[in-house]
Image (cartoon, rainbow, N blue to C red):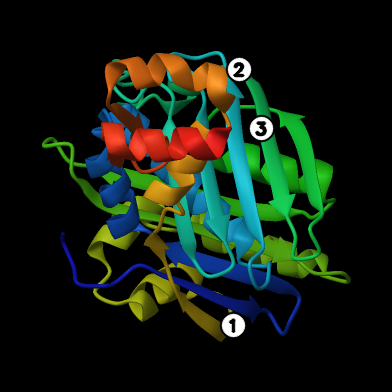
Amino acid sequence: MSNDIHDEIWLGTLLEGQARWVVAKTTDLVEEARSRHQTSPVATAALGRLMTASLLLASSLKGNESITIRLLGNGPLGGVVAVGNAQGEVRGYVHEPFTDLPLNENGKLDVAQAVGQGEFAVSKSLENGENFTSMVPLISGEIAEDLAHYLLNSEQIPSATLLGVLVERDYQVMGAGGMLIQLLPGASEECIEKIEEQINKLPEGISKIASESRSMEEMVQTLLGGLSYQVLEKRPAGFQCSCSKERVGATLISLGREGFKEILQDKQAELVCHFCNEHYQFDEKELMELYEQAK
């Protein structure tokens, strides 16, 4: 990695409380996802941006609440899924991780083409057990614009969003991060103009800023330095999957006796977690024990 900053999420307010902001540095967790799923560069960029987006949205949640974002596009990636929670934990996967496309006309990874047209779906899982899902059409497939479009149309919150993943020639992730700025009720026109001005004068994309900043403080200063801002909270962030052998075994049990018979004939089974690509092996004895439970 190009620097020693651990992945973090910082939250705060700016311009005397007229807006809230969230900045996430996600280089390590996106690299872990890339390594686990062996994604192509364009798949890494799409997955990394979506995982970062889920953390930005989940920053306003509490306790065990989580957010799942699904890119249901008709592009060659076949869909991308990311789940982030209030603790800064995130996991995700791409349906077609080996998708490879030529660079776009600007010489960048063609995430929009890889995602295609379709829906941007956000599901919230709340502490009281309630679940809400809302969908908006994908407007660009670049993900940051789609996130802003979702926030404006589904939650009526005007927002500025930046998402980026910098992939090296050896496919390694050298920088990844995101920023979300949301106007609070009563924000002035002057406030909006200042935020736009600050974003427009950023020297590089956010992934480059994440890769070159020597500290999280420096990254935030680069992104927000032209505005008066306050840091209210700092959280760690990391790739974390909720799977386990017990949970995977429960999936086998849910097949019932009929569904189990074919698996028993092979005398062994291997199940793979979509989210983290962990492989779980079950031998004949373990399968027989699960079969008894399935009865």
Secondary structure found at label 1:
loop
Compare marks 2 and 1 and give the one earlier in the sequence.
2
For this view, does 280 lie left or right of residue 161? Answer: left
For this view, does 86 lie left or right of residue 62? Answer: left
Q: Can you identify the residue that label 3 sits on?
A: 120
Using the image, tell me which numbered label, if any, was put on residue 117. 2
In front of the other: 147 or 267: 267
For this view, does 151 lie left or right of residue 68? Answer: right
Residue type marked 2:
Gln
- Residue under the image location 33 percent in, 56 percent down: 29
Residue type marked 1:
Ser
Q: Position of residue 233 (x, y in %)?
A: 55, 83
In front of the other: 184 or 133: 133
Determine contact: label 1, label 3, CB under 8 Å. no
Q: Nearer the viewer, mark 1 or mark 3?
A: 3
- Where, quadrant-wise, is the N terminus in this rendering? bottom left
Q: Position of residue 37 (x, y in %)?
A: 29, 35
- Residue under the image location 60 percent in, 79 percent down: 12
Secondary structure found at label 2:
loop
